[in-house]
Image (cartoon, rainbow, N blue to C red):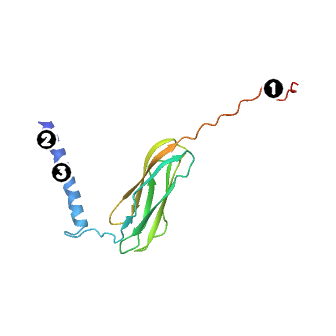
Amino acid sequence: MKKIIYVVSVTGALLFCSNIQAQDAKTAQPHGAEQPTSLADIKFEKTVHDFGTIPQGGNGECEFVFTNTGKEPLVITNCMGSCGCTVPQCPKEPVLPGKKGVIKVKYDTNRVGPFVKSVTVNSNAKSGVVTLQIKGTVEAKPVEEAFPQNKNEGAPKAN
């Protein structure tokens, strides 16, 4: 009997606490009011860049051009590569409505083999988070063989 009373009282306490949180959420925002949304928006010319096959140590840089299609300045708050081999560079200044901006991405091409990496772009755009993608294959450098050494190097030549 004590266990039943204990379980009922704990359950009641949990329900009471969750009800208070729900009431707090309702009073924090008037009924029917929505949170203000940004009037900035972002549209990329492309969201995927395919390097194709590139040589090891080759140029792993590309650019993603975007336009602020909204009605207020677009602020990019964060750009993050999916790993340390993918490094994005995002504009620090707000991009005005109708203007273009560029996100530069550099991939470490010393890593041989196929790759598919992403860059996550966070901003105040009403369309939300955008994911950009780079892909391709890094081909290993050909192995250079040293010329065979002449064993008689430096010895006088026979006549």
Label 1 Cα crowd, 10 Å radius (few <14 / some 14-19 / many 20+)? few
Say which label, 2 or 3, has the lower sequence index.
2
User: Do the numbered discs 3 and 1 sit on residues whose CB atoms are within 8 Å?
Assistant: no
43 or 144, nearer to the observer: 144
Q: Name the secondary structure under disc 2.
A: helix
Q: Name the secondary structure under disc 1.
A: loop
How far, Cα to Cα, is label 3 from label 1? 93 Å
Relative image position of residue 93 (x, y in whole percent): 48, 69
Read off the residue under disc 3.
15
Relative image position of residue 134 (x, y in whole percent): 44, 52
103 or 60, nearer to the observer: 60
Residue lying at 71% horizontally and 30% vertically, measured from the top left: 148
**Residue 97 vs residue 24: left or right?**
right
In the displayed structure, 69 sits above or below 6; it is: below
Figure quadrant of the N terminus: top left
Relative image position of residue 153 (x, y in whole percent): 81, 29
**Residue 95 vs residue 148: left or right?**
left
Say which label, 3 or 1, has the lower sequence index.
3
In this rendering, the count of numbered labels is 3
In the displayed structure, 104 sits above or below 41; it is: above
